[in-house]
Amino acid sequence: MSTQTSTDKVATLLNPTSVAILGARENPSGWTARIFANLIRFEFGGPVYPVNPNHERIWGVKCFPDLRSLPTVPDHLVVMRAAASVPGILREAAAMGTRSATLYAVGFSESGTDAGRALEAELRTAIEETGLAISGPNCLGNLSARARVLTLPDDRVQELVPGPVAMVGQSGTTTPGIARTLMERGIDVSYVVTSGNETGLITADYIRYFVTDPEVRLIFCLVEAVRRADEFLAACRAARDAGKPVVVLKMGVSEGGRRAALSHTGSLAGRVEAFDAVAGPAGVIRVDSADGAVNVIDMLLHASEPRGENVGGLVYSGGVRGLAEDAADRHRVPLPEFAPETRARLRELLGQAQPISNPLDGNGYLTNRPLDDALKVVEAVYNDPGVDMVVMQEDLPPHEGANDANRRRAARVLATMEAIDERFLGDDRKPFALISPASYDLTEFSRAARRRFPHVACLNEPERAFRAIRAVMDYRKRCREAETATAPALPDTATAHVELLRQRAAGATTAFPLTEPESKELLAAFGVPLIEEGLAGTEQEAKELAERIGYPVVVKGVAADLTHKSDAGAVQVNLGDAAAVEQACRDIASNVAAHAPGLRLEGWLVARMAPAGLELVLGMQRDPEMGAVIMFGAGGIWLELVKDVAFGPPGISREGAARLINSTRAGRLLDGYRGQGPYDRDAVIDALVAVGRLAAEAGDVIESLDINPFLVYPKGAGGMALDALAVVGPGAGR
């Protein structure tokens, strides 16, 4: 078995020295013929061997009956053979010395059948035994520009030029389609990998390899379902730390999308909220569409990093100005008023009596006046002290011009952009972007032209433009706030509780809830504050507890399967004396027996009656794809009514917890609203950090955790968990 790292394997896969095409077919429009033609067209540097026992010659060259008959050992296999034959082919090739293969066959786990899953398990075993570098199965091939390799059956790719973008996607059609769009916009792509089912190499492996390539500045991923989330997140953090953004188009946002991802890749896609919660802090920019990805990529590659969020606009259409203002508002991109000195300068240049606001409607001034005059307007806006980025309305000309007027306009636009790039822009200057009224394609002329102003991003139409601007600003902010602090060691009590949970989970066959006292003991071990309470096994013990705690009290029935106490009549509140406590215990026992015959109460939880406070919800959920995420939001009845919640990563820091709180409307309530509050924000942050530690340590054991409500009191008075329910997953943590 190979001792190569996964990064070494990707290098092997994408830089082969020779290629054998298994399953070669004569049909010139078939996949194998087109792959052969691509390798020849782009002058791949090694030999290419067609393999098919039914042909002596094919595509004008010698065809070989099998691998053993080849003149040299093939370094890479293009395997266009039936799924059932693939494991045997890999074992034979590995024994000869072959190092990598791309598997195109379908019929594995993506089929959703037991036979397909069994076949993929057999394939995985073969890959593990041989140590081969494998992309696929259920994929469409790869592109490696520097190695002159194009094993995609795609004749629409016009040139292979190493460039700043590397791409990996589980969809074999969509990923190359986005790559072609980037190329058509003048953005060169070094790598395109269609990873398919990822039975061999996974997305994380490709990301790690792309990080090592000095020419790659940005990584794009089309993700249907994340394989091995911990590795994916670690690879994304490595890319972030290397200054290489990871842009992800994620399927599985809707329930329908999740079903599509399941049928296509054989994996369960998780909720997009969970993906955002953990992938965002790891350096991922998630986009909603292919066009959105193209705009974000264009901006990241061509515009410098803004020092702030304020945008100044230069437009020559009132309609575009209105669309820009609406889009900026929707995506929370500030368009501040220009500074007084800027307005004065613009009035001097434009001759307008009325106040000049932002964005500026130049009414044709920028395109109809001499270049020096137009640059003075740009300079006035660009140098405004309150502007961190400039957007300017302009389409790149599709051709040099069919008549004198068009030629003059094309020349003026290009001269203006060249002058702006040369005079104002650079790596450490304010970013600058063009926005068009609507989406449009670049031509060969405009692609060549835009290379003359490399520091200008070209964004399509205001809505997509400002969505991209917001996404990039959020990404830059997350990078600046990247958390590197090491958490302190866990208390022994917390470690003991987690170990006990692992032991219980290992012996379970189904998920099971902890009782409320057990759930709260776990929370207390990690530092979540609780209300004063105790567990009573008899009515007499309940009365004694109530006397010690002090009236009024709350009494709740306790049983592992009693997860919805109010529905079962198992909660009695505001009890003022011993007689009321005794009666409450009897009533609860009777109510539970009627609600769930056969359910045995383990006792009663007696708690101090908490004074009113702001009700919040804290919690944790184990997502099937991304693992543990934590939750914060409005609690009590508001949780289901308004669903004002936000999600964050396990192990969240205090700064991260503060940002999570600020992303909700409940966060505004904490600071005071209409005469109520402010409340103890620090107490909520402490509790969120504690839940984050619990999620980091036991997120593979706990299926879910709900703390609802978590009551928080006025500033300095703290907060406490009133109710809690933890559910442990079967066999988790093994």
Image (cartoon, rainbow, N blue to C red):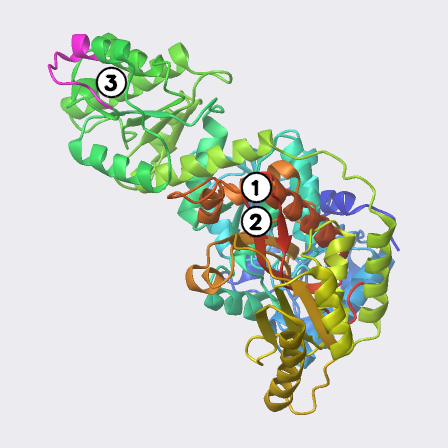
Name the amino acid type tagged 1. Asp
Give how far apart the Cα atoms at labels 1 and 3 are.
59 Å
Q: Which mark is residue 412?
A: 3
Residue 171 falls left or right of residue 68: left
Regarding mark 2 in the picture, which secondary structure is present there? strand
Give how far apart the Cα atoms at labels 2 and 3 are.
62 Å
Give whichever of discs 1 and 3 has the lower sequence position.
3
Q: Residue at the spot x=73%, y=69% of the render?
A: 729
Task: Residue 239 in the image: state x and y as whole percent.
Answer: 65, 37
Q: Residue at the spot x=60%, y=32% of the render?
A: 481
For the C terminus, the image quarter is bottom right
Regarding mark 1 in the picture, which secondary structure is present there? loop
Residue 476 falls left or right of residue 469: right
Q: Would residue 457 be counted in the magenta stretch?
A: no
Give whichever of discs 2 and 1 has the lower sequence position.
1
Q: Which mark is residue 712?
A: 2
Magenta segment range? 346-357
Q: Would residue 352 be counted in the magenta stretch?
A: yes
